[in-house]
Image (cartoon, coloured by chain):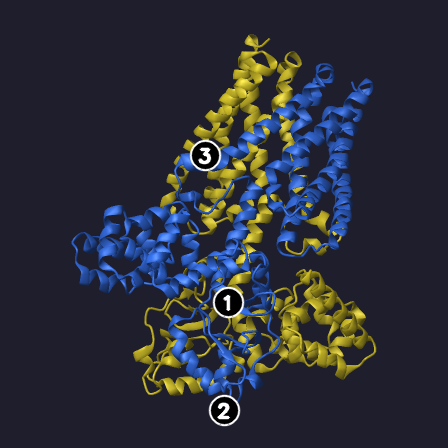
Chain colours: A blue, B yellow
Amino acid sequence: MTESMEREEQKRLQEQLINLLKENEIDAFREEFLDMHPYDQGQFFEELDEDLRFALYEMLSPEEMANIFEQVEVPEEDYQDLLSEMHPMFAADMLAEMSTDDAVDVLNELDKEQVASYLTIMDEEAADEIKELLHYEEYTAGSIMTTEFIAIKANQTVRSAMQILRREAPGAETIYYTFVVDEQKHLVGVISLRDLIVADEETMISDVMSERVVAVSVAEDQEEVARIMRDYNFLALPVVDFQQHLLGIITVDDVIDVMDEEASDDYSKLAGISDVDDTAGNSPFGAAKKRLPWLIILLFLGMMTASLIGRFEDTLNQVAILAIFIPLIGGMAGNTGTQALAVAVRGIATGEIQEEGKLKLLVREALTGVITGGSCGIAVTLVVYVWQGDFILGALVGISVFATLIVATLTGAFIPLFMHRLKIDPAVASGPFITTINDLISILIYFGLATTFMSYLK
Amino acid sequence: MTESMEREEQKRLQEQLINLLKENEIDAFREEFLDMHPYDQGQFFEELDEDLRFALYEMLSPEEMANIFEQVEVPEEDYQDLLSEMHPMFAADMLAEMSTDDAVDVLNELDKEQVASYLTIMDEEAADEIKELLHYEEYTAGSIMTTEFIAIKANQTVRSAMQILRREAPGAETIYYTFVVDEQKHLVGVISLRDLIVADEETMISDVMSERVVAVSVAEDQEEVARIMRDYNFLALPVVDFQQHLLGIITVDDVIDVMDEEASDDYSKLAGISDVDDTAGNSPFGAAKKRLPWLIILLFLGMMTASLIGRFEDTLNQVAILAIFIPLIGGMAGNTGTQALAVAVRGIATGEIQEEGKLKLLVREALTGVITGGSCGIAVTLVVYVWQGDFILGALVGISVFATLIVATLTGAFIPLFMHRLKIDPAVASGPFITTINDLISILIYFGLATTFMSYLK
């Protein structure tokens, strides 16, 4: 009830804003629009057509536009188009006003030449900060950190630290955690604003700070960064180089985005699509483009399966009933493999499976395969026996299910571990891929057994 | 390199701590142990056997144990066992000292009688707070909020608000966002600590607070709560009843846990396992128990597929070659269905697909099916023609793939939307389920066509 009323209200506001834009009512538009949360401003912006975007650029300052642009989520290739709609100077100023980490994310989507030209006309200080961050590889701590943090010295009083915080608060990404450095900029401690405001104003920072500060290396994988922040409930995490110099901080909102991205990524790969995030807004051609690569690969893998079965054509010609259990055995193999795969991929992603735990996992999966295979094998034997009245056929299908489930479970667990060892993202050995491999294995087992024992079949 | 050194270091520390526990060296143990981060304490605790846990309970206060217990993640059924190892008074004190929301999470796993007995012997104030939260349904905002928040009045000065904050900081879940209420406890505004410390001390709160405060209803779905906090980058979100009374707050760390849980949940369901989180630590029996339900269901669905193919036994007997394409067609149908399902489930989960967007999604999926089906169908026809030298067979398989892909894509998108309408979690229409349904559909199409046009086949 309330939710649909809220949506009505939003729609009405949106229409009103669009009218103000069209009628060029700058003051009225600014009053309404700037009162909205930046996220809602971003949502509004994403809905506009080109003409209205031009009108909007006219009405806002680069700084106001920066707040919106930080929130905008469009397909990567669209950032270039949006920026080239703006006056180059306006675009450069806007990029300079954005949070450094967000500006870098946008610049990473552009051509090198275009990046260079924006950096040239930009305010020098902002350009330098951005250049520093542009060096870091994607998906590392360096690529998601910001350099807009506040650092204080250990030999200050709480009072002087609070003065720095008050002064720097407007430009800093967070002031709730302040990191303490020595004269050579080495990270030596951390203090929360919570501890600062309850501390006596004359105390030295060194007496109230915590020296047990967890930091990550600038080259650390962003997934590991997310894991640490989640486990330790940090709101900010310092990033250091190999000599413990403080380079930047990562805040919890960036980590939430990373978690979302990584989870979505593993999920998409399990489903065999390149990415799922913005698909809902895409055209059928866009959606088909994302899905076809997998389907075509599977088609050719499926041809291999077909040619494998083709080799058993004699067996099939003599006992056509064998064919009816192909989907059952293949399906069971595919599913149990996907289950084992999913557990292994998630275990690797969350850091639960360490190097030493790999053998343990494989042994456990083999035993799991024996248990599930045994249970399903017996069930299948009985059902087929009762249904077809042929115990040998039942036993043949049952034994195939048993053997298939053990092998498929092991394959499902082994392949991601092996890929992880080769430093390939294990999620690419995704659901459909493992399903097809296990299809092949299951058919080999089933028809191999059937051909061997054919003389016993009715 | 550094990472493996760190792990060595941790292992050494862990062994040292276990020795201190065994030798009952209380002081030395406490000094080392209490210096660790609560998360690491929790990890250490999870590794201990029963005897060592008893030794630990002897050495720690209920309050110290509460910090650890907030971090412990064990299978739900184990919480009861852990609590019954402790002296009831110790357990009750520990629960009272925990964050109310975490204590409620633990109590939700226990028998009603046991909950009642702990609440009876517990400190009355803590018991009342817990009782209030126990009412809320799982997976709602009420179930993840905490009542340990600080509220201030609009007609206070900044100075007096800061005094309240300093006094209440130790017991509050966060002090970085403070919510402002009127005399009747209605939520009227919010102010961040950042704004408080830069404001002049004599200003009235009503002059510096923001009145545009986003709040969620106590009955709101936790997934929606997570979405709001992610989109708006909030560190804390107020929870209100239908009359806008402030009931509690939700902090960002709780939301990170929710996001993790929900993403993991969708992922597990796509893979056909009940849950994936702690599986890596489980025994083979535990793992088999989680996977078998799905496998058994699939077995019986597979039997249906087999009996469906059985109906076409005559066709099969005459043209055995038809059998070799069963896995290919079934596999394509299963995969395209899973792709469409994954997009729809994620779209629903992230709130991208609203009520009005459903028809649009179905139309888009149908068109996507036509494009992918057309491409794959033509490819299959050509490959089979070249390979088997039989154009009619090629066309038969190709047309089956074309028709199957359209139907399977639509089914994959329709089923989760339909379940969402029925207020069932769409993720339960998971990967293996949709795969089997599409297996059935594809076989019906394939053998239906084959039987109709059999006279044309070589």
* Cα–Cα span, label 2 and label 1: 27 Å
Quadrant for the C terminus of chain B, please.
top right
Up-down relation of residue A162 to residue A380 (above or below): below
Residue A408 image position (x, y, % from top left):
71, 38
Q: Identify which residue is drawn at 45% across, 79% down.
A: B150
* Cα–Cα span, label 3 and label 2: 65 Å
- Residue A447: which quarter of the image? top right
- Residue indicated by mark 2: A202
Judge the density around disc 3: few (<14), some (14-19), many (≥20) Cα neighbours within 10 Å.
Answer: many
Judged from the image, the secondary structure of the residue bearing numbered disc 2 is: loop
Residue A455 image position (x, y, % from top left):
82, 18
Judged from the image, the secondary structure of the residue bearing numbered disc 3 is: helix
- Residue indicated by mark 3: A288
Q: Identify which residue is drawn at 36% across, 78% down.
A: B184
Q: Residue furthest bottom?
A: A202
Tag in front: 3 or 2: 2
Q: Identify which residue is drawn at 55% across, 8% down.
A: B456
Up-down relation of residue B165 to residue B288 (above or below): below
Please name whichever residue, B366 or B233, is drawn nearer the observer in this view of the structure.
Answer: B233
Q: Are marks 2 and 1 on the same chain?
A: yes
- Residue A387: which quarter of the image? top right
- Residue indicated by mark 1: A249
Sooner in the amino-acid sequence: mark 3 or mark 2: 2
Please name whichever residue, A75 or A96, is drawn nearer the observer in this view of the structure.
Answer: A96
